[in-house]
Amino acid sequence: MVEPALQIEGLCKSFGSLVATDDLHLDIAPGEIHAIIGPNGAGKTTLISQLSGEQRPDKGRIKFTGRDITSLSMPARATLGLARSFQITSIFSDFSTLDNVALAVQAHAGHSFHFWRPANKAATLRGPALHALERIGLGKRADEPAANLSHGEQRQLEIAMALATEPAVMLLDEPMAGMGRDETANMVEILQGLKSRHTIVLIEHDMDAVFALADRITVLVYGRAIATGRPEEIRANDAVRAAYLGTGDA
Amino acid sequence: MDPLLLLEQAFNGLQFGVMLFLIAAGLTLVFGIMDLVNLAHGALVMIGAYLATALVAWTDSFILGMILALPATFAVGALVEIVALRTLYRRDHLDQVLATFGLILFFNEIVRIIWGPVSLYSGLPDYLSGHVEIIPGAPYPVFRLLIIAVGLAVAAIIYFIVAHTRLGMLIRAGASNNEMVGALGVNIKSLFTFVFALGAVFAGLAGMMLGPLTSVEPGMGEPLLILAFVVIIIGGIGSIRGAFIAAIIVGLADTMGRVLLPVLLRAVVSDAAADTAGPALASMLIYILMAAILVVRPRGLFPARTG
Amino acid sequence: MNKRQIWLTLITLALFAAVPPLTVILDQPFYMDVVARIMILAIAAVSLDLILGYGGMVSFGHAAYMGVGAYAVGILSYYGMDNGFLQFPLAMGASALIGLVFGAMSLRTTGVYFIMITLAFAQMLYFLAVSLEEFGGDDGMPAMRSEFAGLLDLNDSMQFYYLIFACLALTLIILHRLVLSRFGMVIRAARGNERRMQALGFSTYRYKLTAFTIAATLCGLSGALFANLNEFVSPDVMQWTHSGEIMIMVIMGGMGTLIGPVLGAAAFLLLEENLPEWMELVMTNAGEHWAIIMGPILIAIVLFGRGGIHALFIRKGKVHG
């Protein structure tokens, strides 16, 4: 039995009387693209937040390749190989596109207590950064100020930054958010190319993309996983249909 | 250690505490609701003191002068908010700090021009100059007792407003999320002006009562301002309750500390060392206390803001 | 760093270097003193720029470290230890240590809390200095100029001037390299988006604390020089208003540019020196009320003076990186 890349055990999180995560159990298999879908307010972003370490769960445990990371800080988890992209674009707009990705590379190149040599001359940072940008298709925009990129390109930059850290697991929070059809198709292609080299936990609303990419899908409703399985199984699942189409069942 | 002396110092500490609360209340409300760092709040303390002194002289009545000074300070507060501060709400904290710093220079100078650089004498009428025995054998100045009473009364009024009125509800809502309050259709501009002016009145009241105890002079507000900051840090930004509790703690700790520390030190080190270190440590005590609390609670004891 | 900025820096430094011979030629030795003071405060302002302009840390207690440096020199001098080779490292070491301690506690907070805590800690040091009767208390005490074992005579104005100049130049060089280094990138990126930095794997607290300590150390150097220039130390150097003035120098000059704060220090001190005179020209006896003009000038700079003096020379845009 191959060890899951991520194990979520009995995760609970509430904000006052609002239950965001309700005793969640989930295993993410290594190398798979595992999509998490659900209606708005289902607690998807809160889940990513707890997985990345931005928020602490009230109860439960998170294991990363067998190791308990529940009490680890965000930077510590990132160093272990857990990368995250954000739902609302979160890049360094004061820097160039390449600098953005170079920072991601730098984060995993040991400590940064280097005070003298200019960072933008470090080939060990620029090389992998440029490579990540090219994989994503942003190679030509490397020297552009990140603030000048189009929305879609910035979403790609988000992915490039997550990629540049050579993560074992990537948490992608709505990478397709706000993208048009062509951009989405492009992104789907990029993500398909990442399959098997990285484990991906994907939150998305775009159902076409989800069904095109996912190896398995978990459906989250009110913080609870009501179904987990392969795309075909989920499509046929009655409980899922009820939750999405609301056929009278609460 | 004379217990009566301790009792007197405890009362002084309480009096200092309520005074700090009056200053801190306005400051924490303005921070909490408008997200405005206002370094010029100490200037409002000073303006209250000057207005009171001037009005007392003009009306030749202590009580009347003091009472008139309250709406006068309210008006000044409202004017400052409308003219100078509205543009700062959208700005980042650095801009607010620098701009209000500029306001301090301006106000201190205005006061110097109008009333001169020498401190004004702000006297007490006879019926307030005496002493009262709080317990037999322990005389305590009537005026200081009055300050404590007024301070507690204002605290009670503020509590009532915040907990039991619609205005208070707006204040509490605004403290945690002022954008939402605006979205609900409340006239945010007027609310902000009112809150600021109200804070100015409390600060001015502190200044008015402080005048007779020390002196009325340019720059008198600044040392208190920083202590008010400490109070708010300890109490938690945006929290009136926090400001009250923290103010009493700070008032007592500072006053009692100055009395007790040298005594305690003498028991441990030589007299000479205690006499040097005592006052030094006493003046740092509040800040050490603040640092200690922050280690455990980086947002103060009762932080109101969620953001 | 773009070419224009390098030119601006070099020209400014060249002008500073030319002052002593010029004052000798023009027989105006007083101005050497004025510019020496400007350079000392420029070091303090530049050190603040590192954490404020590049790091986004609004530290309102920076003058405290200048005070630590000054008092280190003053206290050692009081006990007869005039050796500059001992005083200066100790002054910088003391500022570094206190910066580390204060920074460690302050950086656990953010936003308004951070501003107020740095202010409160600085005030604490001020009161400490005031209460130390032995060292002059409120009035301060005189300090002898440091001795450098015959290598350098600080009583010679020109030698002292060039020592200060060297310190300023060195500070600018070190910080210039620092902000472009890997360390500098972390500080600058964390300013814009700290959450993202943590998500990438940077423990930003460590880096910010290190920058804070470096800034405190350089400010301590400024303080040591200050004590020497005035041959006097007093708590006034640590007053919170002084912290405010240093911050104004940074903003007025142009924050996040390193050379900007140098220009800001010059502008601020020259304004402070000359404003009373200029006001006298307009109206007699107006000069003593210069603060009433200074206040609104400050407000105007904040509201309208985006980019400071630096922006007059160099268009707003990418300055570093």
Image (tube, helix red, strand yellow):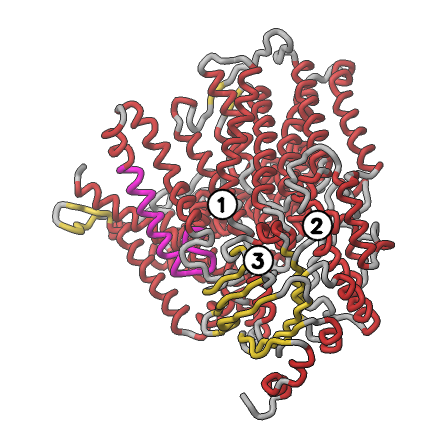
Question: Is residue B243 highlighted in magenta?
Answer: yes
* Residue under label 3: A64
The amino acid pointed to by label 3 is Phe
Q: Is residue C245 magenta?
A: no
Q: Secondary structure at mark 1?
A: helix
Q: Position of residue C196 (x, y in %)?
A: 65, 54
Q: Earlier in the sequence, mark 3 or mark 2?
A: 3
Callout 1 amino acid: Ile
B159 w.r.t. C190: above or below: below
Crowding near the residue tagged with mark 1, few <14, some 14–19, many ≥20 C-alpha atoms within 10 Å = many
Q: Which mark is residue C207?
A: none
Of circles 3 and 2, the one toward us is 3
Which residue is painted at 21% across and 46% down in the image? B7
| Near-viewer residue (C39 or B157) | C39
| Quadrant of image for the N terminus of chain C | top right
Rendered location of residue C50, percent (x, y): 65, 38
Q: In this orientation, which residue lies closer to the viewer: C260 or A121?
A: A121
Q: Main secondary structure of the magenta part?
A: helix
As drawn, which residue projects farthest toward the right? A140
Q: Are marks 3 and 1 in contact (CB under 8 Å)?
A: no
The image position of residue B234, as x and y in percent, is 41, 51
Magenta stretch bounds? B233-260
**Is residue B69 shown to the viewer in this render?**
no
On the image, numbered disc 2 is attached to which residue?
Answer: A104
Question: In the image, is B68 to the left or to the right of C199?
Answer: left
